[in-house]
Amino acid sequence: MPSLFNTTRLQGKTVVVTGASAGIGAATAVLFAKAGANLVLLARRQNLLDEVKAAAEAGAAEFGQKISVVTKTLDVNDRQAVDNLVPELKAAGVKSLVNNAGGAIGVEKAGDIALADIDFMINTNLVSLIQLTQVFLAEFKAQDSGHIINIGSLAGREAYVGGSIYCAVKHAVRAFTTSVRKEVVATGIRVTEVAPGAVETNFSVVRFRGDEAAAKNVYKGIEPLVAEDIAEEIVWVAGRPAHVQIAELFILPTAQASATIFGRKE
Ligand SMILES: NC(=O)c1ccc[n+]([C@@H]2O[C@H](COP(=O)([O-])OP(=O)(O)OC[C@H]3O[C@@H](n4cnc5c(N)ncnc54)[C@H](OP(=O)(O)O)[C@@H]3O)[C@@H](O)[C@H]2O)c1
Ligand SMILES: *[C@@H]1O[C@H](CO)[C@@H](O)[C@H](O)[C@H]1NC(C)=O
């Protein structure tokens, strides 16, 4: 284990990760397991959650950690199911919530964006993140501790062509996260935004509606971030001492300087 994670602070703590079936969420689950955290893993695809659970258990065993892993099929846009989460999970004594589920659909420009895509992006990235935050805040306030880690994006700092809705929602995630941090300042609750640039996950395949070649092109001639890079940041943030609040992290590949400025080779 990297020395960064050579801490006992996360041992026995329960962490909820949304969108834990793939990409950044899955890598984060495995790394939390290696650091000894108990996991509650949520996503729509149960078969993939089962695989991530097995990988997390193997990772924990590798580092001599005893953990428990609970998986639950959840569409974060199912408002009733999200409302029922805390009563269902209460026994787990959740300490951290990683709001990671999300993504972008399409690169159409305003005027040509399907309403269904607009609804999906706003709901999944923003409304669900807000609902989940509210649901767990009640619990965290009762404990006077807890950590909300929201996955933002470069798109929450810079608006770009073909990303109007995704950029709008990630800007909103950033604003919401900042307001909540200010609101809970007199509690022991910590609030963090982790905002990555280009990470090669299934993100671009989803954005380009399954067009693998178009997705690959996003990372052409650069070494992009990988899911494990962002997982390291998330687990590091969660593992700081209780009086240390990492407010925000903005992480880019070395070969990226903005949404459009890349140092592409060849
Ligand atoms: N990759 C990047 O370049 C990048 C950059 C900045 C920010 N981000 C953000 O990072 C987060 C994770 O993305 P990723 O790169 O890891 O993409 P990914 O590989 O496509 O993973 C997305 C995850 O979100 C889950 N998800 C999507 N819709 C959901 C829903 N309605 N209910 C529950 N879970 C849902 C998916 O699980 P199921 O399909 O099984 O439900 C999957 O586990 C997103 O918020 C994304 O906006 C990504
Ligand atoms: C990637 O996204 C595509 C398009 O949504 C989907 O068909 C495929 O199953 C996804 N793959 C993974 C590994 O999540």
Image (tube, rainbow, N blue to C red):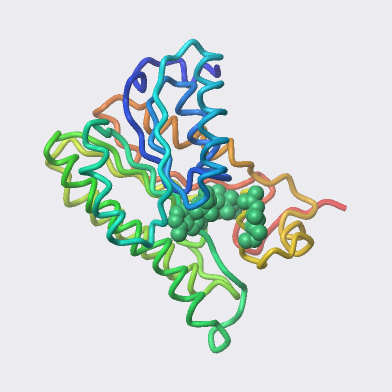
* 9 left or right of 139 in image: right
In the image, residue 154 lies at what x, y percent?
52, 57
Residue drawn 22% across and 53% down? 134
* 240 left or right of 136 in image: right
Q: Nearer the viewer, residue 91 or 187?
A: 91
Q: Hey, which quadrant is residue 95 in on the image?
A: top left
Residue drawn 53% across and 39% down? 26
In the image, residue 30 lies at what x, y percent?
52, 30
In this view, which residue lies farthest toward the top? 64
Q: Nearer the viewer, residue 44 or 59?
A: 44
In the image, residue 54 lies at what x, y percent?
55, 28
Q: Hey, which quadrant is residue 237 in on the image?
A: top left
Residue drawn 30% across and 54% down? 82
Q: Nearer the viewer, residue 172 or 212?
A: 212
Q: Hey, which quadrant is residue 143 in on the image?
A: top left
Marker count (numbered): 0
Q: Nearer the viewer, residue 146 or 155?
A: 146
Which quadrant of the rendered structure holds the N terminus? top right
* 253 left or right of 172 in image: right
In this view, which residue lies farthest toward the right? 266
In the image, residue 252 lies at what x, y percent?
58, 47
Looking at the image, residue 54 lies above or below residue 263: above
Residue 200 visible: no
Residue 87 visible: yes
Residue drawn 36% across and 39% down? 16
